[in-house]
């Protein structure tokens, strides 16, 4: 089976391409490299010992998509391409709506034209807003607080309407919780430009002494140690969830939504302490004001993915901390 992976050079996409290749799928990538580096294509091939077909281009542009669908016999699509920074989306909403919505519409139109009606879409736990109870199940009310989250919600709605109009589609919407970690080889991982917004990449830069100390955004939440709690999931577990989703949409028509998390909540201090213990490094930190828009606790119910996708996350917080650091160290040495 041949899978088109949009945004396949990015963080989650590259790990998913490795898992696809390891499971004997053929992989075609389209990425405009707006948030990734071309080297990753060769790294995917190095890890797997298999070839991928890479097209550099913008998923918003139907011409290149048509060219791909004409040249390759694509059986299904995993759609990762999009912008993902919450803060930036508040400052540049039009850029986010244009890229995330436009790319999805162009992709779906071309898929329809070539009668390829199987898609896995990357959504986010951000669509649950601030949940009233925990753990979060897929039927919770949806509410967004920033343009990035709203693009995800709008795309989920577009997919639901598309299926309503044509029951020949097979659609899996995956709502990711907090992906961290890296491939165990240390060859690919998360490598944000500049000062990271997210916790794990920031901790890693403190560990490698590129940043002086971690700012912990508040220790007065109603949690066990006052710091925010999240459901961190290893990117390899997440990637394997995509394989299960592809298996599901290949077998059955329909549309369904699945949380991809571990079901465990860990605090900021849990992550800091585990990182220190596993990697034998110091992570100096200071407590600062809460970050605007942050919620106290967020973790998934994973029952639906377990039951319907036959998928469950296996790797631990220790694995996530070890692999993130290993990637950073290896990457620095390679430079
Ligand atoms: P990423 O930025 O590393 O990867 C996205 C890739 O898409 C990049 O390689 C980028 O160059 C490419 N891209 C963006 N716009 C494009 C376009 N118009 N045409 C072609 N390529 C384009 O992000 P990621 O962390 O791998 O996230 C992948 C997907 O998962 C995104 O849709 C993101 O919103 C979603 N998601 C991520 C997280 C997270 O914490 N990383 C959480 C929930 C959901
Ligand atoms: N945090 C700090 N210091 C930092 C960065 C984060 O204390 O420098 C704290 C936050 O306050 C929060 C926790 O660490 O309590 C996790 O923060 P992240 O920024 O790593 O992750 P978020 O849960 O805020 O957001 C992430 C993605 C969003 C996505 C959301 C739900 O960035 O895109 O998960 O999936 F929408």
Image (cartoon, rainbow, N blue to C red):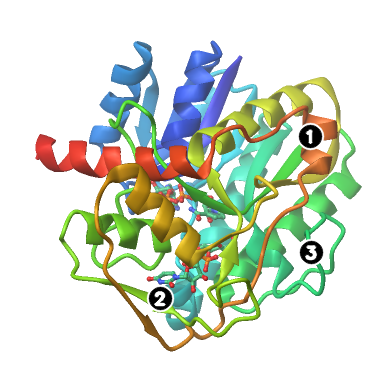
Q: In the rendered image, which residue does mark 2 sit on? A: 216
Image x and y of residue 321, in percent: 40, 45
Mark 3 and mark 1 lie on one chain; the one further toward the N terminus is 3
Q: In the rendered image, which residue does mark 1 sit on? A: 306
Q: Nearer the viewer, residue 193 or 130?
A: 130
Asked if ligand 2 lies within 8 A of label 3, the reply is no
Q: Nearer the viewer, residue 128 or 90?
A: 128
Can the viewer see residue 7? Answer: no
Determine the secondary structure under disc 2: strand
Quarter occupied by residue 214:
bottom left
Asked if ligand 2 lies within 8 A of label 2, the reply is yes
Residue 260 shows which numbered tag?
A: none
Can the viewer see residue 113? Answer: yes
* Residue plotted at (82% across, 55% down): 137
Q: In the rendered image, which residue does mark 3 sit on? A: 134
Mark 1 and mark 2 lie on one chain; the one further toward the N terminus is 2
Q: Crowding at label 3, few (<14), some or many (≥20) Cα neighbours within 10 Å?
A: few
């Amino acid at each position: 089976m041949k899978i088109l992976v949009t945004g396949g050079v990015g963080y989650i996409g590259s790990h998913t391409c490795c898992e696809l290749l390891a499971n004997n799928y053929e992989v075609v990538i389209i990425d405009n490299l707006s948030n990734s580096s071309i080297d990753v294509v060769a790294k995917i091939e190095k890890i797997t010992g298999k070839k991928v077909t890479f097209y550099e281009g913008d998923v918003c542009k139907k011409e290149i998509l048509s060219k791909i669908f004409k040249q390759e016999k694509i059986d299904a699509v995993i759609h990762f391409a999009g912008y993902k920074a919450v803060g930036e989306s508040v400052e540049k909403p039009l850029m986010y709506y244009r890229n995330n919505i436009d790319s999805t519409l162009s992709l779906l139109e071309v898929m329809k034209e070539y009668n390829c009606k199987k898609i896995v879409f990357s959504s986010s736990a951000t669509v649950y807003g601030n949940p009233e109870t925990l753990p979060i199940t897929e039927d919770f009310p949806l509410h967004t607080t920033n343009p990035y989250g709203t693009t995800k919600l709008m795309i989920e709605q577009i997919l639901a309407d598309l299926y309503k109009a044509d029951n020949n589609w097979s659609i899996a919407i995956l709502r990711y919780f907090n992906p961290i970690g890296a491939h165990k080889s240390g060859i690919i991982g998360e490598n944000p430009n500049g000062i990271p917004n997210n916790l794990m990449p920031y901790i890693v830069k403190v560990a490698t002494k590129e940043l002086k100390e971690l700012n912990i955004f508040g220790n007065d939440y109603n949690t066990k140690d006052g710091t925010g709690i999240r459901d961190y999931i290893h990117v390899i577990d997440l990637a394997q969830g995509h394989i299960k989703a592809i298996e599901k949409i290949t077998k059955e028509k329909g549309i369904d939504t699945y949380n991809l998390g571990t079901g465990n909540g860990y605090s900021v201090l849990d992550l800091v302490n585990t990182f220190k213990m596993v990697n034998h490094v110091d992570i100096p930190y200071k407590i600062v004001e809460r970050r605007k828009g942050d919620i106290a606790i967020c973790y998934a119910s994973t029952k639906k993915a377990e039951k319907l996708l036959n998928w469950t996350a296996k790797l631990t917080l220790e694995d996530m901390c070890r692999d993130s650091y290993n990637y950073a160290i290896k990457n620095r040495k390679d430079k």
